[in-house]
Amino acid sequence: LWVTFHLPQELLEPIKSYVDVKMWQDPEFDMPQDEFEAAAQEADILWTVVSNQVTADVIKRAPKLKMIANLAVGYNNIDTEAATEAGIIVTNTPDVLADTTADLAFLLMMMAARRTLEGARALYQGQWKGWQVLGMTGMDIHHKTLGIIGMGTIGELVAKRATGFDMNVIYHNRHEKPNAYGAQYRSKEDLLREADFIIVLTPLTPATRNLITKEELALMKKSAMLINVARGGIVNEDDLYEALIKGDILAAASDVFVEEPVPTKHPLLTLANFTALPHLGSATVETRLGMVSRNVESLLAYFNKHSIPFRVV
Ligand code: 8YV
């Protein structure tokens, strides 16, 4: 079994008696893709994270591979069609991170609304000049309309939070969800036109890549804010930059990027009306340990020839 990220040894204990374990040793940096591909070639089982690209080509050159446990709910890093064809089991970590990620979605929305990054940056840089009536004023979220695009488990938990903040919630999803905390279904276009805040929460698939481009941004209110806690690539970053520069929308925030870690020269990072976080959606101790447990459960079921929980392929 190849663990392609760094885990504290004690978390490997439950599986060690079943299998020889190799692990990426650097806790600071992701495993580079070429080293990951070399690991995949010799692995029977891979324990991966979303920075590992398991393409059809990687699968073709991994003759022994039988299972991939992905430490994430999203599995856009894995070519599931190629895995299915090769008879490879793929598992993920559903539900356990949903509340934590919903919290972060809310946090990012409020950071954008209240301009907290801008304010904190000014303070740390010694540029806080004192209280002014209209200094650093943001926008209230209460009694505003929140539009959720992608009403899965995390979307519903964001809607739940929003009701406690007296927001009016609308959503767009492939299927209508009648019991989603009073949230009202809208077409994508109507949601874009009506919402004051939009939170993107779809998985990244061929259908959702570039779901938000200049056309969608143009439909949004000029006072609206766009928040992405799903995946880079769902929102077109070049178009978002243009929209923020031109004032097509007021502000945006994102926890996810097309390239992660984000290059320090990324144009979006130069904008005062853009708030960035380093993919912290699921980053609490409780949730990360819960995610590890989900994968361990799947692995133990595999070793013991039981039916495999959290299986996506
Ligand atoms: C993961 C995530 O921690 O679960 C997901 O889909 O985006 C994160 O919570 C991260 O992607 C590492 O695999």
Image (cartoon, rainbow, N blue to C red):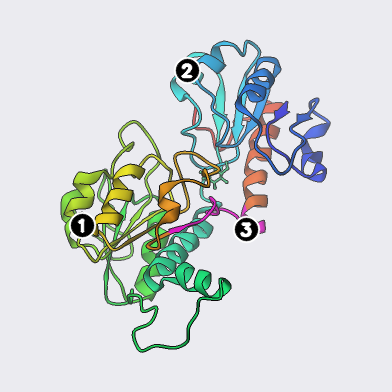
Answer left or right for 309 relative to 38. left
Instruction: State the CA–CA distance, disc 2 to disc 1.
Output: 38 Å
Residue 2 magenta-highlighted: no
Answer left or right for 105 relative to 12. left
From this viewpoint, is residue 168 visible? Answer: yes
Q: Which region is colored magenta?
A: 275-287
Q: Is residue 20 above or below residue 152?
A: above
Residues marked 1 and 3 touching at CB (< 8 Å)? no
Residue 143: horizontal and vertical position, in percent?
27, 77
Residue 50: horizontal and vertical position, in percent?
55, 37
Ligand 1 sits in which quadrant? top right
Q: Residue at x 69, y 37 (%)?
A: 5
Q: Which mark is residue 220?
A: 1
Residue 55: horizontal and vertical position, in percent?
50, 21
Q: Quadrant of the N terminus?
A: top right
Q: Label 2 amino acid?
A: Ala
Residue 279 magenta-highlighted: yes
Q: Residues within 10 Å of mark 3 (few under 14, many from 20)?
A: few
Q: Which mark is residue 92?
A: none
Mark 2 or mark 1, which has the lower sequence index? 2
Element marked by disc 2: helix
Q: Label 1 amino acid?
A: Met
Residue located beneath label 3 in the image: 284
Q: Which mark is residue 82?
A: 2
